Every structure is written in structure tokens, then in C-alpha cells.
Image: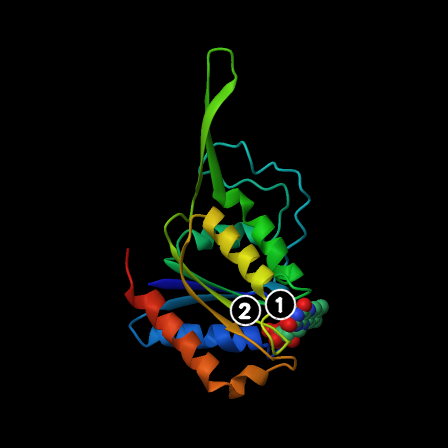
Amino acid sequence: MKLTAIIGSPRQNSNTEILVDKVIEGCKSRGAVEVDKIFIADKKIEFCNGCLTCMGVEPGKLTCSIKDDMAEILEQMQTSDAFVFGTPNHMRTVSPLLLNFLCRMLPLLTFRAEYDDRGNRIAGEMSSLIKGKKTAMVISQGEKYFCSSLVYEVLINNLRDFRLKNMGNVVSLGNLSAGEVAKKTADLDKAFNLGEVLAIQNG
Ligand SMILES: Cc1cc2nc3c(=O)[nH]c(=O)nc-3n(C[C@H](O)[C@H](O)[C@H](O)COP(=O)(O)O)c2cc1C
């Protein structure tokens, strides 16, 4: 199987990356896995300019007015069987890097419209070029009490919009410093198990 791991933290030795690596490890423990690890901060991915050129084009055609690394990433995402999206809690939501990445994923959405004789839109169906693929979510936050409900909601609802099938999540608390989660066995185990679930559960 092919797993695409998307890391939305901008810092080195990030808790997000450590947890995502554990998901990858768990996945690999169940068989051969080709991993495509995307560290968003290292890519040339400009801000979505909101032009919506991507909407209203022929379904299946990936169109974006911005020419950067995202074009190749979107092509590669379509060949993946599963995803893991990782993000730190930044200001109670997903990181700006990941939010922009989700915006730039919009070309993966397809919209088939039906029109009447006069050209009025009478029906339409939204779908996605990555429909039905499995996904998992990893969230790391600084506070020791749970304050990532919005991060969770933003991420899970967007992944649902892309018609991905969520297989589970890890939310790790109290990781203010870089790399802190490396000592948290329970969270690391949960991430490993999530990787196994991505590998073994079908349908
Ligand atoms: C700009 C910024 C905003 C943050 N906002 C929050 C927050 O609202 N709640 C929280 O619990 N932690 C917050 N944090 C702390 C991070 O969520 C925490 O350090 C996290 O573990 C970072 O993950 P990383 O190591 O993968 O980057 C914030 C950190 C930064 C840099």
C-alpha cells in the first residue's frame, strides 16, 4: 500500500512529526508500505489566492492558477491508498500551513452539475478524486487540558468533504517544547496502533 503523510508543523523535531512517524511505523509493521512524507514547510506551496479557477472545470482535471509544488503533490495524492494528516494546535485551530494545504487541495473536489433547458442549475453532486481512501489524524497541543476540539472539528470535517474515510486519531496534550512527545509512551503506542489500523482495515 501507499501511505501519504502530511506534516503541518513548521518546526524541526516537531511533536507532530514524531507522532506521524509512529503511525508510519505501525503501518509498516503490517506489511510493505511505500511512504510519501510531505513536510509542508519544506515545499514551495503558495497561499491559495481564492480565484476558484479549480471549481467548475471538467471533473477529473486538476486545475489551479498557481504553479508550484502543489500540482505534483495533488497528482501523487491520487495514487495513495491512505493518508495521515498531522498538525499542531495553533491558536486553537489547525496550523496555518495545514489550513493553506487544505485550501490548495480544492482541485481534488469535483462538482457535476445538472442544468435544465434554460441553463438553470437544477441539481449537482460534489465528489472527490481521493474519495473512499483511508485517513488518520494526529494533533499535538501545548496545553495540558484538552483544547483541540476546534482543531479536530476543522480537520475531520474537511477530510470528510474530501470523502476520505477517517480511521481514527491521536490527540497528544502538554507538548509545548519540540520533541516532548518522544517520552509519552501511551501516545506513541496509540499512534503506532493507528498505523496498524490504516494498514489492516479495508472497506
Ligand atoms: C503560534 C502558536 C499557537 C499555538 N496555540 C496553541 C493553542 O491555542 N493551544 C495549545 O494548547 N497550544 C498551542 N500552541 C502550542 C502547540 O500546539 C504545541 O507546542 C504543539 O505541541 C506544537 O506541535 P509541534 O511540535 O508539532 O509543532 C501554539 C503554538 C504556536 C507556535
Label at residue 139: 2
Residue at the (57%, 38%) spot, across then down: 54
Q: Quadrant of the N terminus?
A: bottom left
Question: Dot 1, how many residues are within 10 Å of its Cα: few (below 14), some (14-19), or many (20+)?
Answer: many
Q: Considering depth in this image, is 177 or 81 the residue closer to the camera?
A: 177
Label 2, ligand 1: CB separation under 8 Å: no
Question: In the rendered image, is residue 134 in sight?
Answer: yes
Determine the image quadrant of residue 25. Answer: bottom left
Residue 79, position as x, y percentages in the image: 39, 54
Relative to 119, residue 50 above or below: below
Q: Quadrant of the C terminus?
A: bottom left
Describe residue 99's horizontal placement relative to residue 161 as left or right: right
Real-space Cα separation, disc 1 to disc 2, in angstroms: 7 Å
Check the image and name the residue furthest to the front.
145
Disc with the residue nearer the chain's start (1 vs 2)? 1
Q: Which residue is mark 1?
A: 89
For image coordinates 60% across by 49% down, the residue present is 103
Q: Is mark 1 within 8 Å of ligand 1?
A: yes
Picture layout, residue 164 above or below residue 89? above
Which residue is nearer to you in this view: 146 or 31? Answer: 146
The amino acid type found where label 1 is placed reads Asn
